[in-house]
């Protein structure tokens, strides 16, 4: 399965993934929303910065995934702190993700630049920061 993942441009997430400083992606919510339970080891992630340019610039392979059970705010904060070396979250990002009841931690490997391309988002009514696309070729422009 392929996924299009929007990254925080202001926090330089894409650059940190490409240079190897960052090895994990985090998502979290009050309920079980994407990508909870929908991403597996071996899946391909295609990265776009969330700055409006709309171009996929890199890809990575999912090495491992952790989908948390329902957690207290304290447990959630501890989990995020424990993985901060791989996550490399800014203070603002830490505040956004730590404390969520459900957290998904995705370890990535083989992060590489790709020739930039746009995707067709017309099949995604609610634009989220995580789009499961089955095959990247189906949405590549």
Image: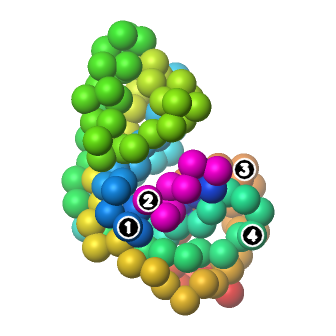
Vertical placement of 16 versus 59: above or below? above
Horizontal relation, residue 26 to residue 121: left or right: left
Marked residue nearer the N-terminal end (1 or 3): 1
Label disc, if present, on residue 100 of the rendered structure: none
Please name the residue shown 40% across and 49% down the image: 25
Residue at image coords 59%, 75%: 56
**Residue 53 numbered mark, or none:** 4
Task: Indicate the secondary structure of the residue bearing disc 3.
Answer: loop
Name above or below for residue 15 compared with residue 34.
Answer: below
Asked whether the residues under the numbered discs 3 and 2 touch, taking CB atoms below 8 Å apart as contact, a structural biologist would say: no
Compare marks 4 and 1 and give the one earlier in the sequence: 1
Mark-to-mark CA distance, 1 and 3: 31 Å
Q: Quadrant of residue 1?
A: bottom left
Is 128 located above or below residue 4 in the figure? above
Question: Mark 1 = which residue?
Answer: 19
Is residue 29 visible in the rendered image? The answer is no
Q: Are marks 1 and 2 in contact (CB under 8 Å)?
A: yes
Whichever of labels 3 and 2 marks the residue nearer the N terminus, that label is 2
Residue behind mark 2: 16
Residue 34, x across and y down, in percent: 50, 45
Q: CA distance from mark 1 to mark 2?
A: 5 Å
The range drawn in magenta is 10-16
Q: Secondary structure beneath disc 1? A: loop
**Residue 136 forms part of the magenta stretch:** no
């Amino acid at each position: 399965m392929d996924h299009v993942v929007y990254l925080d441009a202001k926090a330089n997430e894409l650059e940190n993934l490409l240079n190897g400083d960052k090895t994990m992606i985090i998502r979290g919510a009050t309920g079980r929303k994407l990508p909870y339970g929908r991403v597996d080891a071996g899946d391909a992630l295609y990265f776009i910065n969330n700055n409006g340019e709309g171009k996929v610039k890199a890809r990575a392979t999912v090495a491992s995934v952790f989908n948390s059970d329902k957690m207290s705010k304290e447990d959630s904060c501890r989990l995020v702190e424990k993985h901060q070396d791989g996550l490399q979250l800014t203070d603002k990002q830490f505040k956004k993700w730590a404390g969520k009841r459900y957290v998904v931690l995705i370890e990535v490997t083989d992060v590489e630049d790709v020739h930039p391309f746009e995707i067709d988002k017309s099949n995604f009514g609610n634009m989220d920061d995580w789009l499961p696309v089955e095959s990247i070729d189906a949405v590549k422009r």
